[in-house]
Amino acid sequence: MFADTENSAREADRKIADVVAERIERLIVDGVLRAGQALPSERRLTDKLGVSRTALREGPKLLRARGIIETAHGKGSFVANLTAQPPQSPLMHLLASQPRTLYDLFEVRGMLEAESARLAAQRGTPADYMMITRRYEEMLAAHDMATDPATHARLDHAFHLAICEASHNPVLVHTLSSLTELLLSSVFASVNNLYHRQPHRKRIGRQHACLYNAVTGKLPEQAYRAAPRITSTACATACRRSNRRSSVWCGRR
């Protein structure tokens, strides 16, 4: 009888552990907990989830086994980098090695960033808009300094990624993150072609400002139109410089 009772208690704890793991996963998917962020303390999670500390400890064990969280001795548990870049696949190598794919990347960027901006304007939280503002200000500060093109490209990409994260669509965020290195090549091309030329630099600056104001001003349709204009400007300039595929996409907008 006692053994049966003990087994039932363990089974109940296992089920509660599954619920705890599922709830923490939901916090991650919803963007409440982000990569590198520490999980709340046991006391806070116990109060928030309404479970015993024993069950609470079992939940993170499941998440560690799945590679969703990591634990550092003396520091606690953190959300793992779920979009870590794997070794480059043969397909990614081929795409990165062919100059013609640059224009395909501009096209993909236009689509992803337009929808990201629209959703960010609809769903973004005050914390999201604070992060977007920080990334926008970092990008602006770099414009006034003698920053190398690679740094400019990463700051530009970080601004657009912050907007994407504010969409609260984990599939969209994962898609954009998984293409980071490829997309950076198109951003780098934009920086090389635009940022050292004052007229182009001012134009792209105005377009970024329009996008920033539309997203943080919660204007979805304006944000949707503003995002691809930036990509279109960069693509059109690259097309004129290379005289290849200029009529395929760059002239459509």
Image (tube, grey):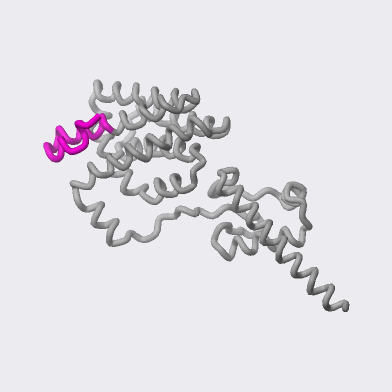
Give the quadrant of residue 200: top left
Give the quadrant of residue 231: top left
Q: Residue at x 22, y 47 (%)?
A: 101
- The boundaries of the magenta stretch are 232-253
Measured from the top left, where is residue 70 in percent x and y? 58, 58
Examine the structure image and report whether residue 233 is included in the region drawn in magenta: yes
Residue 141 visible somewhere in the drawing: no
Examine the structure image and report whether residue 58 is included in the region drawn in magenta: no
Q: Residue furthest left?
A: 243
Measured from the top left, where is residue 41 in percent x and y? 71, 50
Quadrant for the N terminus, please.
bottom right
Give the main secondary structure, helix, strand or loop, of the magenta stretch.
helix
Q: Residue at x 21, y 37 (%)?
A: 249
Residue 204 visible somewhere in the drawing: yes
Q: Residue furthest right?
A: 1
Query: Going by the image, does 241 lie left or right of 23?
Result: left
Q: Residue at x 36, y 31 (%)?
A: 227
Q: 165 or 72, which lies in front? A: 165
Measured from the top left, where is residue 16 in percent x and y? 72, 60
Quadrant for the C terminus, please.
top left
Q: Residue at x 75, y 65 (%)?
A: 13
Q: How many marks?
A: 0
Measured from the top left, where is residue 138 in percent x and y? 43, 31
Q: Is residue 11 above or below residue 162?
A: below
